[in-house]
């Protein structure tokens, strides 16, 4: 089924149909404020298995459970420590996932056998209505084939998963454009396991000190979030990150062009207008990294193998949401070239 949510009169019926499929243990893609999710009943392991199959996702990578209210969060965890309570009050609904001790109600394949579970409340009217009507918690990873950039519109979902899932709710373009921030709240001090839509600075304003998983900074450490060890977000052609000024960037374009390579450039509007390249896809302004976040995955997907051999991409400043942007780009990239 493909439901285009464009007519207010039909919304109730469309979402009711999607909710019915979910209650029948089918998988359905739906928009959230971060990226599109691929949902299934989080209490039913057979339904959850269909997510792993459709995505080609490794079974040791746990899924985030989506619920409709803070009260729902408490149904699936042993307890909610004080810092987690503050974070839930401040950022839910919103792009934040809290990791808490599971009480065992959520199916084992959702948590990949861990004692903990990740829970969030999406801030999107379609996702909220779907959760209310389905009246079940939804395990929902991003609705892309594993390893590919996450989907920020229904065309991306259709491209990756058509024929593999029971339905797609098309609610247009998503808002934040990047996934939620994953915060482990099982210790005394909350720890960011994956940077995302809520920044470290925003979290610290609410709970004081917040740690960052050392593996996010030093690549030799083993990440505490199983999913962070996999390659991710990869476009169809190799992506190289270029850290340097416009002159350095242009030199790299020229060198590769001389070697006979068709070069694509992915950069902010500010840098793009200083460069000469065969194909340039600007992705927002350096002055407004939220814009870059919104356009990031769509831009990664827009480079086609038939048109370019390599993508040279700007190295964005790692402040605010720039931390999440660079986390995704570093996972997507096969090389980083730095002007020393
Ligand atoms: P995705 O569903 O594709 O947005 O990815 C979910 C991310 O959350 C992955 O990086 C998972 O490893 C992480 N995650 C989910 N549940 C847990 C958990 N219980 N403990 C640690 N990380 C988790
Ligand atoms: Mg994902």
Image (cartoon, helix red, strand yellow):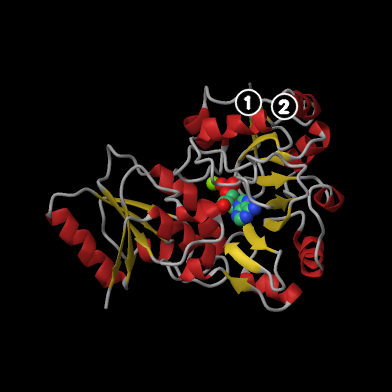
Q: Element under label 1?
A: strand
Q: Is residue 10 left or right of residue 315?
A: right
Q: Element under label 2?
A: helix
Where is residue 273 drawn, in percent x and y? Answer: 35, 62
Q: Residues within 10 Å of mark 1 (few under 14, many from 20)?
A: many
Q: How many marks?
A: 2
- Which badge, 2 or 1, comes first in the chain's sequence? 2
Instruction: Work out whether residue 41 or residue 314 is closer to the camera in this orientation and state it.
Output: 41
Instruction: Work out whether residue 176 or residue 146 is closer to the camera in this orientation and state it.
Output: 146
Where is residue 58 drawn, in percent x and y? Answer: 50, 41
At 69% from the left and 31% from the top, the residue drawn is 5
At 77% from the left and 57% from the top, the residue drawn is 92
Instruction: Work out whether residue 108 or residue 134 is closer to the camera in this orientation and state it.
Output: 108
38 relative to 262, above or below: above
Where is residue 179 drawn, in percent x and y? Answer: 59, 53
> From this viewpoint, which residue is outermost toward the right?
71
């Amino acid at each position: 089924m493909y439901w285009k949510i464009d007519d207010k009169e039909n919304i109730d019926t469309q979402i009711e149909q999607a909710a019915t499929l979910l209650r029948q243990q089918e998988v359905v893609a739906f928009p959230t404020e971060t990226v599109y999710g691929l949902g299934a009943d989080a209490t039913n392991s057979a339904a959850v298995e269909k997510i792993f199959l459709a995505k080609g996702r490794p079974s040791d990578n746990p899924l985030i459970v989506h619920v409709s209210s803070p009260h729902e969060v408490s149904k699936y965890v042993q307890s909610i420590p004080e810092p987690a309570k503050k974070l839930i009050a401040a950022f839910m609904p919103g792009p934040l996932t809290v990791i808490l001790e599971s009480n065992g109600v959520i199916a084992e394949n959702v948590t990949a056998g861990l004692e903990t579970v990740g829970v969030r409340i999406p801030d999107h009217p379609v996702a909220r209505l779907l959760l209310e009507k389905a009246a079940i918690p939804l395990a929902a990873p991003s609705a892309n084939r594993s390893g590919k950039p996450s989907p920020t519109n229904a065309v991306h979902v259709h491209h990756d998963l058509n024929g593999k899932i029971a339905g797609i709710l098309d609610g247009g373009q998503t808002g934040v454009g990047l996934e939620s921030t994953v915060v482990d709240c099982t210790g005394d001090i909350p720890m960011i396991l994956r940077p995302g839509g809520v920044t470290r600075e925003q979290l610290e304003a609410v709970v004081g000190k917040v740690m960052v998983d050392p593996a996010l900074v030093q690549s030799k450490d083993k990440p505490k979030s199983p999913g962070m060890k996999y390659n991710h977000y990869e476009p169809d052609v190799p992506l190289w990150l270029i850290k340097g000024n416009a002159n350095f960037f242009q030199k790299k374009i020229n060198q590769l062009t001389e070697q006979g390579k068709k070069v694509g450039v992915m950069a902010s509007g500010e840098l793009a207008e200083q460069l000469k390249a065969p194909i340039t896809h600007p992705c927002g302004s350096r002055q407004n990294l939220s814009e870059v976040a919104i356009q990031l995955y769509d831009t990664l997907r827009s480079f086609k193998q038939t048109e370019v051999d390599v993508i040279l991409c700007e190295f964005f400043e790692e402040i605010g949401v720039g931390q999440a942007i660079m986390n995704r780009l570093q996972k997507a990239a096969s090389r980083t070239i730095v002007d020393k």
